Image (tube, rainbow, N blue to C red):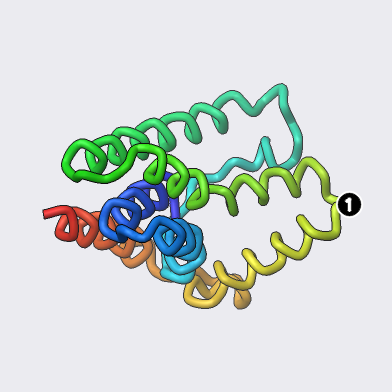
Amino acid sequence: MILLTHIFIAAIIAAKIKYWPLALFFALLSHYSLDFLPHNEYLIKNIERKDWKNSEKDFLKIGIDFGIGIILGMLVFYSSNANFLIISAAVILSILPDGLTVLYWILPNNKLLKKHYNLSKIIHSVFNNKKENKKSPFFGRIFAQVLVIIIGFAFLG
């Protein structure tokens, strides 16, 4: 899933679950749960290859994605009576796994980061058919993300 989906769903979880430790736990868990679904992700190969000279477009994609996610998270905050710090912590936890993946690309010899990266690859491959080098149909991958956002808005109301 792209960052905005993770951020939006985590903000909704934090707004709806009043017991903050449980809200934070489910915000982190939501990242892995959403990654089970068929989804599309944009390529950031230059960052993965540590080709910093050619990475500005990759960072721009991430920045736009993150920015839209933060706008959606703020929408959740302003439409609920939730605590800003709890929503912020939930958002951070929801994108932490992707941050750990990028950190693994930078520090590939770190054993803990490698274990997380391998777990993440397994989670991504379950319904995305990546083990067979096939992907779910493009429409299905986009539809899953749009559906998650629509369901999120339904929970807001």
Horizontal side of residue 73 vs 25, given as left or right: left
Image spot of residue 149 (x, y percent): 26, 55
Residue closest to the eye, 138 or 117? 117
User: Which residue, as the protein is rendered here, is positioned at the far left?
Assistant: 157
Name the residue located 85 percent from the left edge and 52 percent from the top edge: 110
Question: For numbered disc 1, what is the local secondary structure?
Answer: loop
Horizontal side of residue 91 vs 79, given as left or right: right
Q: Is residue 133 above or below residue 64?
A: below
Name the residue located 59 percent from the left edge and 54 percent from the top edge: 97
Image spot of residue 67 (x, y percent): 39, 31
Q: How many marks?
A: 1
Image spot of residue 142 (x, y percent): 33, 58
Name the residue located 62 percent from the left edge and 75 percent from the top edge: 131
Residue closest to the eye, 103 or 74? 74
Instruction: Write down the residue under mark 1.
Output: 109
Image spot of residue 69 (x, y percent): 36, 39
* Quadrant hosting residue 88: top left
Q: Quadrant of the N terminus?
A: bottom left
User: Which residue, as the protein is rendered here, is positioned at the far right?
Assistant: 109
Q: Quadrant of the C terminus?
A: bottom left
Q: Amino acid at mark 1?
A: Asn
Name the residue located 57 percent from the left edge and 49 percent from the top edge: 96
The crowding category of the residue bearing disc 1, from other C-alpha atoms within 10 Å (few below 14, some 14 to 19, many at least 20), is few
Horizontal side of residue 105 vs 43, given as left or right: right
Horizontal side of residue 109 vs 147, given as left or right: right
